[in-house]
Image (cartoon, rainbow, N blue to C red):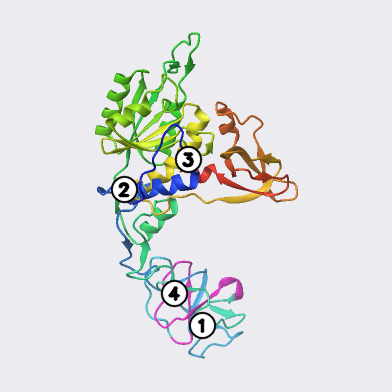
Amino acid sequence: MAQPMTNSAVSPLLPVDDVRRQLIDLAACVTDAEKVLSNSALGRVVADDQVSQIDVPPADNSAMDGYALNVASGLLDAGVPLKVSARIAAGQVAAPLTPATVARIFTGAELPAEADSVIMQEETRVEGDRVILNRIPKVGEFVRSKGQDIQQKQLILERGTRLDAQHLGLLASIGIAEVSVYRRLKIAVLSTGDELVEPGNVLQHGQIFNSNRSLLKGLIEGLGMQCIDLGLVADNPEATEKALLEGADAADCIISSGGVSVGEEDYVKSAVEQLGDLQIWRIAIKPGKPLAFGRVKQTPFFGLPGNPVSVFVTFCILARPFLMKCQGCQDTLPPVYQFRSEFSFAGGSRREYLRVQVTRATDGTMCVQQYPNQGSNILSSVVWANGLAVVDIDEQVSKGALIKVYLFSDLLS
């Protein structure tokens, strides 16, 4: 396990990649599992390897509406009228194919014994009660062979797979009605700041509505985890410590917004140091420099900045990989793409995550536009955007060059 990073007010800013690697190393997967209905397991993480007990398909079947025949026998000729000895619909089991005949067969129907291929109906013509083949197909043509998709005893899903809709269909195809999944992580969320007011109240001078509470709840539930809402916490040491201890007892991880900077009214960081330990603080990331990570008693804690865009970015880039690892996921890091930049940008002393929109240009290539106001308080930029572009320290991005992008479709699920 990585050693905790030491911090002080004069410590250099910590590189994003180093912090993310350390967080993943520090993450411990939940061990509790539960059985749920497979068709209700969307977004859950598989706790055991899933192995098929059957072949899929369970027998050779037809891929087309047409006629089943035995090519290998050599008894059939194109242009010669052939007797239709059977009619086989999906779900029926037919007797073995009579030599020198064909069987009318429909898509998905099991091939009769002695049949080795299918000719589609468009390549035949019917004359009375006989069928004429326009050609003789090859052995195995238009036949879905037994076990073509999945074979008995085959591993189909590894432990740690997060279930998408296609996984649910795959489980159903091998007859699995219930699946063992890790229990949902419980994430306690609290907001700090005496200037904050909950929506539905009337703003007074100097106050703003608390958007971080709703934002974090949505981010957490979007990952399939359970949010424990500790509400708005007053800016004083006693209230802060009480909320943190409540979160430590109720949840697998605590996430706060605000209170981890260096202001005189920022009590969260000092409270965490009193109740546990602080392992990471001050990251070379923009927005989001004052992010903190530590433990309250033995419960992991993330202290995110107060500005809403900083909350969004630091959650997606740093908290999400940690939480996904704790949830048991194999894949914790989202893919990074490269698209053509439609703007120039000069990187500074911190890695920047720009709110961008990826669209298709008139020439058909994917290109990236940046939101004009990249302030950490501009939450509307996150709604406009569909991705975060990455600009490394001192990197010079030229218009027309490739730029690295994380897509929201990967970050938010």
Give the vertical position of 17 relative to 194 (above or below).
Answer: below
Marks 2 and 1, the one that precedes in the sequence: 2
Marks 1 and 4, the one that precedes in the sequence: 1
Foreground disc of the pair 2, 1: 2
Query: Which residue does the image show at 62% across and 80% down from the upper left?
Result: 134
Q: Is residue 146 left or right of residue 117?
A: left
Q: Is residue 56 left or right of residue 338?
A: left
The quarter of the picture where residue 120 lies is bottom right
Residue 128 picture location, percent across and down: 56, 76
Q: Residue furthest bottom?
A: 74
Q: CA distance from mark 3 to mark 2?
A: 19 Å
Q: Residues within 10 Å of mark 1 (few under 14, many from 20)?
A: some
Q: Judge whether residue 188 is colored magenta.
A: no
Q: Which residue is mark 1?
A: 139
Marks 3 and 2, the one that precedes in the sequence: 2
The residue range painted magenta reads 99-124
Q: CA distance from mark 4 to mark 2?
A: 43 Å
Name the secondary structure under disc 2.
loop
Q: Judge whether residue 102 is colored magenta.
A: yes
Residue type at mark 3 is Cys
Q: Nearer the viewer, residue 178 or 266?
A: 266
Q: Nearer the viewer, residue 128 or 21?
A: 21
Q: Which residue is mark 3?
A: 316
Q: Which residue is mark 4?
A: 145
Q: Which residue is mark 2?
A: 28
Residue type at mark 2 is Ala
Name the secondary structure under disc 1.
loop
Asked whether residue 137 appears in the rendered view, the answer is: yes
Residue 172 picture location, percent across and down: 36, 57
